[in-house]
Image (cartoon, rainbow, N blue to C red):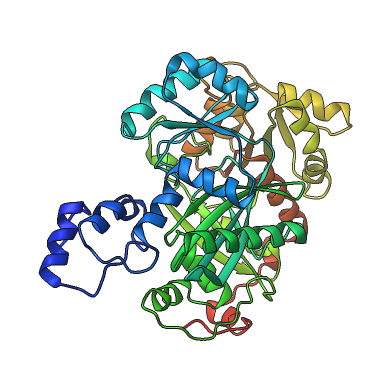
Amino acid sequence: MFDEITFESILDLYESENPVGIVLSMGGQIPNNLAIDLAEAGVRILGTAAEDIDRAEDRKKFSSLLDRLGIDQPRWTHLTDLDRTEAAVEALGGYPVLVRPSYVLSGAAMSVAHERHELERILGRASQISPRHPVVVSKFEVHAREVEIDAVADEGRLVLYAISEHVEDAGVHSGDATLVLPPQRLYIETIRRVKKIAASVAAELKITGPFNMQFLAKNNAVKVIECNLRASRSFPFVSKATGNNFVAEAMRRMLGVRQPIDNHSLDLDLVAVKAPKFSFDRLTGADPILGVEMASTGEVGCFGDDLHEALLHAMQATGFRFPRNGVLLSLGPVEDKFWFADEARAIADELGLPIYATEGTAEALRTIGIECAAVSKEADTSPSAIELMDAGRIDLVINIPRSFDELGRPDGYLIRRRAVEAGLPLITDLQLARALIEALRRRDESSLAVRAWQDYRKRLPVALD
């Protein structure tokens, strides 16, 4: 039997079964939203107390907690009056800004506004989603790395953790990001600060059980995005990658069972990559672009001897095919065009693939001596990118949005949509594009070893229980 998770249905079950207690931290966001009401009704909650869950979920309370601990966070403000919109954005440092309801910290109802009209449209929608809580507007950090820690604590003491990094820059929902464990490109000092902050927050909230924290990292400066006092979607991934069963350990701690445990998440003899799977081809007209709201419908986890092998395995598992015919580049802002210069040169010189580029990208690449054929973004202007995709001359599309119209919509929609409809690999994030080309430089298809998960398990410091 299946029933909706509501306050009433939980109380009915609790009264019927008379359990020792209930676990909220394994059921996503909805159970956490019910924590206070359940505790006030006399339900015994195992693990972290309801009032501490509320302190993490309520943005104002959590922000005050971080301030008291001296932990940095992106600038933010509550916004309830549309007349204050522009003044609030100016006080935060200008656009872009991130908008979300206060009690929804996992991506739902979140949007990034790049200009005034887009912000007004988002605010109208957000206020309807969460009428009991004010809307939070935060400064959106550009070109920052995103780091996650999945952890288990016992009465505020950190007992098990795994720190992962996103390949994409911050701004891509964690469920849509490409996750790497152990981190490959983070400074040691950044890793140390992430662990220290997580330990401080766990102690302050007296966490017992699972939790996940997300951070922005830029030049060793670390800022907290959010703290979720529940198991995250990456718990199974980090468990398989490290050999430590995070969920089992969290349950033991919530039940008061304590045993010695070794943590080896930073010195693994392998690299694991979690990659998202999208179904944009089944959504007519949907723009296949990543953002702060989750769009993926599944995910895969793959291992490799290094990042290049693990990344290519993961991307192949989600439908990626090695390019054979040609690569289309549409590289967004001017700085991004030149930032991708080494990778573009590698596509032509090392991979031996012809480059087709939209007009602005072609002009930039030619100024630095990279040969490419210019194509149009419009379907009715020849030669067009869409025409070449249909002819089979392009089998990898790298499309980084450059500009936004008055409604905040990114350009290049027709190219992205046709790539999805044609079943072509599509990359819309510059960091992921750079990582992919680097992997293709280092590994050809024949060099990717196929091993069973059990073979990788033998290389783990601890055995998964």
Q: Quadrant of the N terminus?
A: bottom left
Q: Quadrant of residue 169?
A: top right
| Residue 37 image offset from top left, x and y in percent | 25, 52
Q: Residue at x 66, y 66 (%)?
A: 182
Number of numbered discs visible in the structure rendering: 0
Q: Is residue 326 above or below residue 386?
A: below
| Left/right of residue 302 with respect to residue 2 in the rendered view | right
The location of residue 71, given as percent across then percent down, is 63, 49
Q: Is residue 116 above or below residue 324?
A: above
In the rendered image, residue 430, in percent from the top left (x then y), is placed at 68, 40
Residue 56 locus on image (x, y percent): 45, 51
- Work out whether residue 127 or residue 132 is closer to the camera in this orientation and state it: 132
Image quarter for residue 10? Answer: bottom left
342 sits to left or right of 435: right
Q: Is residue 101 above or below residue 359?
A: below
Camera-side residue of 229 and 403: 229
Give me the residue at 52% from left, 37% from top: 291
- At x 39%, y 42%, the residue is 103
Depth check: give the residue in front, 350 or 124.
124
Q: Residue at x 46, y 44 (%)?
A: 61
Q: From where the camera sits, is residue 95 visible? A: no
Is residue 343 rendered to the left or right of residue 69?
A: right
Residue 259 visible in the shown view: yes
